[in-house]
Image (cartoon, helix red, strand yellow):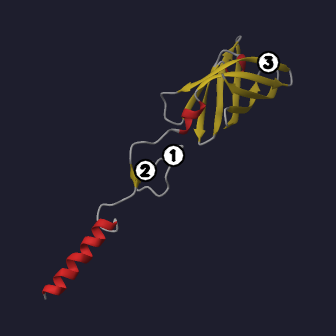
Amino acid sequence: MLKHKAVTVLFLSLITFSGIGFGCKPEGCTEPNSDNYDPEAETDNGECIPSRDKFMGNYNAAEVCPTGSFVYVAVIDTSLASDTTLLISNFADLNIAVRAEVFRNDFTIPRQQFNISSDNVFVSGTGGIDGGQITINYTLERPARTEGCTINLVKQ
C-alpha cells in the first residue's frame, strides 16, 4: 500500500513539473495581426507588437501617374481608431490624410472621400512593405477623370 502511494505521488509530481499538468499553458502573443504572433500560445503575455508599427515614419515619396511623376514627403503615423489603422499624411502630395487598414505586411486603403479645390475626390488602394520600402497602388477618382497611380515610399 505504501509503495502504491509513493508511485502515485511520484507520477503526479512528474505530471505537474513537466508542464503536462494543470495551469501550464504556453504564453506568447495571441493577436494574429501582430508581428510576433505565436500560434502555439494559449495565454497572451501582453507583449504583442502591432503590425502597423513597422510602417511608422517620415518617407521620401516618388509617385508615378498617367498625368506625371511627383516627388514629395509623406508621413505615416498611428490612428487612434485601432492597432491596425494607419494615417498616411500628405497622401499623393494633396495635403490629405488617408486612413489605411493593416494586416501584417500589407494594407488596404478603403474608398474615402475628400474635398480638394471644391471637387469631391475619392481615393482607394492597396499597399505593402518590403524592408524599408513601401509600395502603394491607388486610384484617384476626380469628377473629370479617374487615374491609377503608384507611390514608392523610402524611409528617411
Split into 4 quadrants, where in the image is the C terminus?
top right
Q: Observer-nearest residue: 125 or 113?
A: 125
Q: Residue at x 30, y 61 (%)?
A: 23
Q: CA distance from mark 2 to mark 3?
A: 44 Å
State the image coordinates of residue 119 (x, y, percent, origin top left): 72, 15
Q: Residue at x 55, y 39 (%)?
A: 51
Q: Which residue is mark 3?
A: 70
Q: Which residue is mark 2?
A: 28
Q: Secondary structure at mark 1?
A: loop
* Amino acid type for the residue under numbered disc 3: Phe
The answer to whether marks 2 and 3 mark residues whose Cβ atoms lie closer than 8 Å is no
Q: Residue at x 45, y 48 (%)?
A: 29
* Mark sitting on residue 36: 1
Q: Secondary structure at mark 2?
A: strand
Give the foreground label among 3 and 1.
1
User: Disc 3 or 1, which lies upstream in sequence?
Assistant: 1
Q: How busy is the neighbourhood of tag 1: few (under 14 within 10 Å), some, or many (20 plus)?
A: some
* Amino acid type for the residue under numbered disc 1: Asn
User: Disc 2 or 1, which lies upstream in sequence?
Assistant: 2
Q: Quadrant of residue 112?
A: top right
Relative to 25, is 105 on the left or the right?
right
The answer to whether marks 2 and 1 mark residues whose Cβ atoms lie closer than 8 Å is yes
User: Disc 2 or 3, which lies upstream in sequence?
Assistant: 2
Q: CA distance from mark 2 to mark 1?
A: 8 Å
The outermost residue toward the top is 117
